[in-house]
Image (cartoon, rainbow, N blue to C red):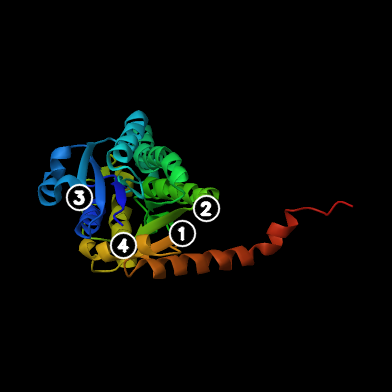
């Protein structure tokens, strides 16, 4: 049976690839973008199976209306993919208030608005799957993209709570955590804070450290098509899944380091609890 997908940021990157993956196998896609002309190739190739919707996910009212439009048009809402987002570069000291708020507005609140809009339809169906596009930066953190990491850590916490809250309604939830891929995440779609010269020397070092941790060869976005279908088709999909070769090693090293440090300071932690009251 054909599924209905709602995919934000469908004009490029993962959103484009996953739209193609769904459409090629006969599913239907409500594809959103700020400029719907960027979706013309999908419409020309797949016809009525594509519903292009102009959407800026920062606009809550527009997000709610877009989800309703998709449901009303296709008659169901089976897979929601919160893919719209971007990377904000800059050291923490360099990030302006406007840049910090804008990063959270898109990466966190945009996903929240779409998710909230979709849940009533999924609860009524007794089924559905919400896919949140996070990042290895939602598990670890890297210099010079700290506010981006912060937005993805927030999305991770929000989504883990969500998964527990909606499980009894038959709704599945998955965080997809990609490593480095050949998309324009760090290119045309990225934003950069005004650099502070004090960090110029460290900036180059940080960029090299990030490249080393993520591995030398970026992943192929086309290869994620089969991966996302495997997640959506799974009877028991994971809450979290890495895409790419590098993320598991990064997460393993981070968690081993955290556990070691927590254990080292465990005596202090327990002392901070205070005496047990009788």
Whole-number angstrom distance, CA of label 4 to CA of label 3: 18 Å
Q: Can residue 14 be seen in this snapshot?
A: yes
Residue picked out by circle 2:
167
Of mark 1 and mark 4, the one earlier in the sequence is 4
Residue picked out by circle 1:
239
* Residue density around tag 3, few if under 14, some if 14–19, many if 20 or more, within 10 Å: some
Residue picked out by circle 3:
12
Of mark 2 and mark 3, the one earlier in the sequence is 3
Residue picked out by circle 4:
229
Q: Considering the numbered disc 1 on the image, is that residue within a helix, a strand or a loop?
A: loop
Image disc number at residue 89: none
Query: Mark 4, mark 3: which one is toward the viewer?
Result: 4
Q: Is residue 63 above or below residue 3?
A: above
Query: Mark 2, mark 3: which one is toward the viewer?
Result: 2
Of mark 4 and mark 3, the one earlier in the sequence is 3
Evaluate if marks 2 and 1 touch, with contact meaning CB atoms under 8 Å apart: no
């Amino acid at each position: 049976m054909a599924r209905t997908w709602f995919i934000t940021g469908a004009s490029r990157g993962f959103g484009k690839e996953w739209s193609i993956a769904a459409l090629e196998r006969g599913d239907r896609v409500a594809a959103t973008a700020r400029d719907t002309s960027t979706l013309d190739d999908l419409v020309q190739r797949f016809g009525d199976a594509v519903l292009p919707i102009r959407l800026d996910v920062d606009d809550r009212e527009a997000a709610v209306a877009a989800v309703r439009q998709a449901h009303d048009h296709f008659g169901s809402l089976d897979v929601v993919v919160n893919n719209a987002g971007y990377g904000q570069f800059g050291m923490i000291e360099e990030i302006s208030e406007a840049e910090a708020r804008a990063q959270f507005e898109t990466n966190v609140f945009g996903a929240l608005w779409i998710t909230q809009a979709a849940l009533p339809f999924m609860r009524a169906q007794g089924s559905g799957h919400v896919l949140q596009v996070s990042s290895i930066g939602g598990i670890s953190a890297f210099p010079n993209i700290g506010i981006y990491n912060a937005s993805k850590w927030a999305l991770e916490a929000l989504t883990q709570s969500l998964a527990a809250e909606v499980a009894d309604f038959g709704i599945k939830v998955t965080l997809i955590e990609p490593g480095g891929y050949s998309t324009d995440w760090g290119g045309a779609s990225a934003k950069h804070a005004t650099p502070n010269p004090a960090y110029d020397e460290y900036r180059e070092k940080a960029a090299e450290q990030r490249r080393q941790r993520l591995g030398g060869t970026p992943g192929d976005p086309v290869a994620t098509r089969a991966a996302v279908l495997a997640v959506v088709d799974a009877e028991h999909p994971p809450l979290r899944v890495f895409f790419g070769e590098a993320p598991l090693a990064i997460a393993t090293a981070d968690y081993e380091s955290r556990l070691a440090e927590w254990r080292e300071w465990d005596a202090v932690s327990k002392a901070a609890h205070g005496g047990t009251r009788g």
